[in-house]
Amino acid sequence: MGLSSLLGLWLPAQTLLPVKQAPLPEATERLLLPDSVLRGQPRTTESVLDLVVPWMLDDRVTRRRQRHVGPLGWMAQRFWGRYWQILDSTKRKYVGTISRPFKIYEGFADEYDLNIFLMPHLPRYVDMAWNGFQVALRRPRSEKHFRFDRPDYECPAELAYQDRGYLTIECEGTPYAPLRDRLAEVFLPMASGPHDLEQWPITGTKNASFGLYGTWCMDCNHNCRPEIHPFEWLWWLDLSADRPGGPRAKSWMIGVLRDGSRRFEDWSPGPRTGTLAIPVAIPKDAPAVRIELEHLAFDSLAPLPEAALAVPADAFSATGNHEFTLVERQIPIQVSFSGSNPQNQIKVWWSDLQHDPRTGTTMGYLNLALSVNNVYAGRLTVDFAPLN
């Protein structure tokens, strides 16, 4: 009788998770660094956030332009060249670090944009930002509305432009109005104006790093500067002293946002349907793994098109408690869910579990699949402590 069969007899209530032997990405070990090391280290933190894999079912943008709503929006596009235009027909992931205060801009009609100004440090996103900037520069418009900053951390030399500073990419989205008060309690600031994230309890650092996913476009209402607008997936690590879990835990803040300004009905229609794969790194001395996903805020969830999202047969609903065992290491894993009940509309599964014999670390992905009518916010905490 093999090891898997023996473990199955020993732990009949637990699902066995086989693990492949393989080297892991370099950033895996950074995921295991203490929060105190990641705090204030943009490049290191960004490399950890870059391990996340976001995707939306409508990842291809079919309409080239979007505009402000109503007759004035139509006139602005037709007569004054005011619109948003895609830089890429495929939605993009982007990872960077705050380079100016987080801001909410209350503008025309239903516009109430979260403005997250992110300067990248990883080469792929530095190239993405610079190439988008070069496309925008070829437009016959002035440079006065391009975003340049000089934050108090080391900036990539490749993003320097003349004496203006370093190129920053503005990432925007309008959150669902009925849940803004709740989101302000558990997620990000929602009041109009600038905010210092060093004072915000769910980031833990002034220069917080974020990952997001959305439409890579030019904002030709403002001189065709490159932007992610609207972003739809958003994630970061809560590095604050009060985050849940023990000293080695990692606490991920994750969100799905359908743009609520009515300007992007073709780029961000309802519902927002997709998957997010979150890396889980298990150190060699971990006695057990405790994972909790707390459902913090959501309006309503649509039926999940499981076939279209390739949800596997061993996926489970994001409710209750689920027990697993890593076969090769015999480590127990508990995945639990708390907060408002999503009525079995979120599916979860493991994938790509690998063990690196050289470091003794195991890493895999916990995948979430959901279809959100307007907004979802959650906190996923990975901790290492004996199970009760």
Image: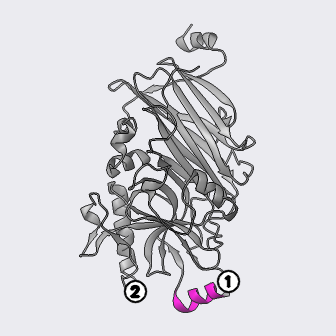
Badge 2 amino acid: Arg
In this image, 9 relative to 188: left or right? right
Which stretch did the figure color magenta?
72-81
Residue denoted by label 1: 70
Q: Identify the mark nearer the N-term, 2 or 1.
A: 1
Q: Secondary structure at mark 2?
A: loop
Q: Is residue 356 visible?
A: yes
Q: Residue at x 24, y 76 (%)?
A: 162
The quarter of the picture where the N terminus appears is top right
Task: Quadrant for residue 199, please give it.
Answer: bottom left
- Contact check, label 2 and label 1, Cβ < 8 Å: no
The quarter of the picture where the C terminus appears is top right
In this image, 150 relative to 241: left or right? left
On the image, the x and y values in percent for residue 260 come to 65, 67
On the image, the x and y values in percent for residue 340 come to 71, 43
Residue denoted by label 2: 141
From this view, report whether residue 203 is shown above or below residue 358.
below
Q: Secondary structure at mark 1?
A: helix
Q: Residue at x 61, y 10 (%)?
A: 10
